[in-house]
Image (tube, grey):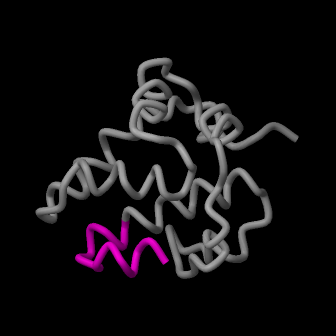
Amino acid sequence: MPGHRIFVTPFSSVYPLYVQKAERKNRLKEEVDRIICWLTGYDQAGLEQQIEQENDFETFFAQAPAIHPNSALITGVVCGVRVEEVEDPLMQKIRYLDKLIDELAKGKAMEKILR
């Protein structure tokens, strides 16, 4: 069975959308970067390198230094789907990231977002 099309979508094409979503709610690009780095283990240089290389989501998460152990604490609904019930591991990581960006845009404090 072929993977979902988001798996082959370049992370660099979605990243600006995350930033725009946050900035529309008076949050900062730096906060988006901090969330991404927290979840994936990338440092700022590693994140920027992933964006420059235009790696797809599958590669972006496959090369992530370390998915945060507290990512399992991320719960809630994104696009009508409970993130904790997503069966595909890659899709679940993508949904975790979506959920964290949603929480940022909704004004949640960084301390609570970064569980």
Residue 108 in the magenta stretch? The answer is yes
Q: Residue at x 54, y 74 (%)?
A: 80
- In this view, the residue in front, 79 or 29, is 29
| Image quadrant in which the N terminus is located | top right
Q: Quadrant of residue 39?
A: bottom right
Task: Point out the residue furthest to the top here.
Answer: 53
Q: Position of residue 75 (x, y in %)?
A: 57, 80
Q: Is residue 19 above or below residue 84?
A: above
Q: Is residue 101 above or below residue 19?
A: below
Q: Residue at x 76, y 56 (%)?
A: 89
Q: Is residue 69 above or below residue 67?
A: below
Q: Position of residue 47 (x, y in %)?
A: 45, 35
Q: Position of residue 98 (x, y in %)?
A: 47, 60
Q: Is residue 53 left or right of residue 4?
A: left
Q: Quadrant of residue 96?
A: bottom right
Q: Quadrant of residue 69?
A: bottom right
Q: Which residues are magenta?
A: 102-115
Q: Is residue 58 left or right of residue 18?
A: right
Q: Residue at x 32, y 72 (%)?
A: 110
Residue 113 in the magenta stretch? The answer is yes
Q: Position of residue 74 (x, y in %)?
A: 57, 76
Give the number of callouts: 0
